[in-house]
Amino acid sequence: MRKALLASTALVGAALLSAPAYAGTVGSGDKLAVKLSGLFWFQASVLDEDNQAGYGRGYRFKIPETEVHVDASNTADNGIKYGVHIELEANQDVTADGDEAWAFLSGDFGRLEIGDQDDVTNRWHVGAYQAHKGLSGPFGGLGGIAPVFHLAPPAWISRTDWQVVTSSDATKIIYLSPKFNGVQVGASFTPDSGQNGGSWTETDSDGDYEKMIGLGARFDGKVGNVGLSASVLYETAEDEDANGADNTINDLEVLAVGVKASFGSFVLGANWRDNNETNVTLANEALGADAGTYWAVAAGYQQGPWGLSVWYSNGELDNASTAAEST
């Protein structure tokens, strides 16, 4: 069923939530096709853990994420498509009303996005996580295991198998080129990894990443009956300490590559990442420390509603002086 929505800009959200379908008029401007969607993620965990007091029950329920998504778009007379995407948080425990909010223009020139959105290196990362079945719901990644066991993974390995660097939804500008024979390149620029929304109070001396640049190249295509995807991603940024100094700690510099092959019901994925000396103090670097490397491989099988996967990951870094290597 389709229903026309006639509402002012201020009331469009309420009209969308009350409507059983989508499409209509937003505000007094051009007509936009409006789509309402979202996600609800319920998690049940059964665990046996002896190293932290207070978690002896052995099971728990959790709702890690609930969001309502609103998309509005149109195509101008010159063929350029434009629109906005807004994600509203719906969990009871969240303190923020929104998550992502961004606008876009797309055409023969490619695609331009501005706003609070994941950068190109986050979104284009190809790898083992794409073969995972069920691990951490829709997201995948080692980072999702840690909350189950109440332990935080080391900073140099957290989320690295599915996100290159977590600029998350900091306000940025992104450009994605058109595809040529399956190949696409992209770039993103984030002035401050701690800045999003309408806040002007974010300083450049509070330990965030500054002048964050992400570069990426991705291939998606087929060779016979085998689907292939691959990505090469690089990210760099200035890393200032809490006092605003940028001469005591190494800047962010990360290189990541990944590949995925799919044929029939099977998926194989692998990825590798080099953190270089990201966030390592200059003093510790002189003593031989680095930020480590990480790699992962995985295989998955899907048959109807059922899936099975197996994966292996490994990370290691050099510590300062004569301290043992962490693996």
Image (tube, rainbow, N blue to C red):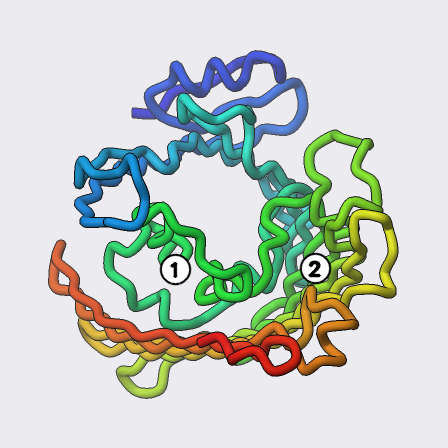
* Quarter holding residue 110: bottom right
Is residue 48 among the parts visible in the rendering? yes
Identify whether 87 is placed above or below 14: below
Instruction: Please tell me which residue lies in front, 128 or 159.
Output: 159
Residue tagged 1: 141
- Say which residue appears at 46% left-offset and 33% top-offset: 69
Label 2 residue SS = strand
Instruction: Please tell me which residue lies in front, 313 or 106.
Output: 313
Is residue 183 among the parts visible in the rendering? no
Q: Quadrant of the C terminus?
A: bottom left
Are the residues tagged 1 and 2 within 8 Å (C-beta)?
no
From mark 1 to mark 2, how far is it between C-alphas? 23 Å
Instruction: State the image coordinates of residue 295 (x, y, percent, origin top left).
Output: 44, 77
Identify whether 195 is placed above or below 15: below
Please identify the residue farthest to the front as the structure is shown. Answer: 322
Q: Earlier in the sequence, mark 1 or mark 2?
A: 1
Instruction: State the image coordinates of residue 290 (x, y, percent, origin top left).
Output: 64, 76
Q: Residues within 10 Å of mark 1 (few under 14, many from 20)?
A: many
- Say which residue appears at 54% left-offset and 60% top-offset: 155
- Say which residue appears at 74% left-offset and 67% top-offset: 281
Amino acid type, mark 1: Gly
Label 1 residue SS = loop
Amino acid type, mark 2: Ser
* 204 on left or right of 151: right
* 171 on left or right of 36: right
Q: Which mark is residue 188?
A: 2
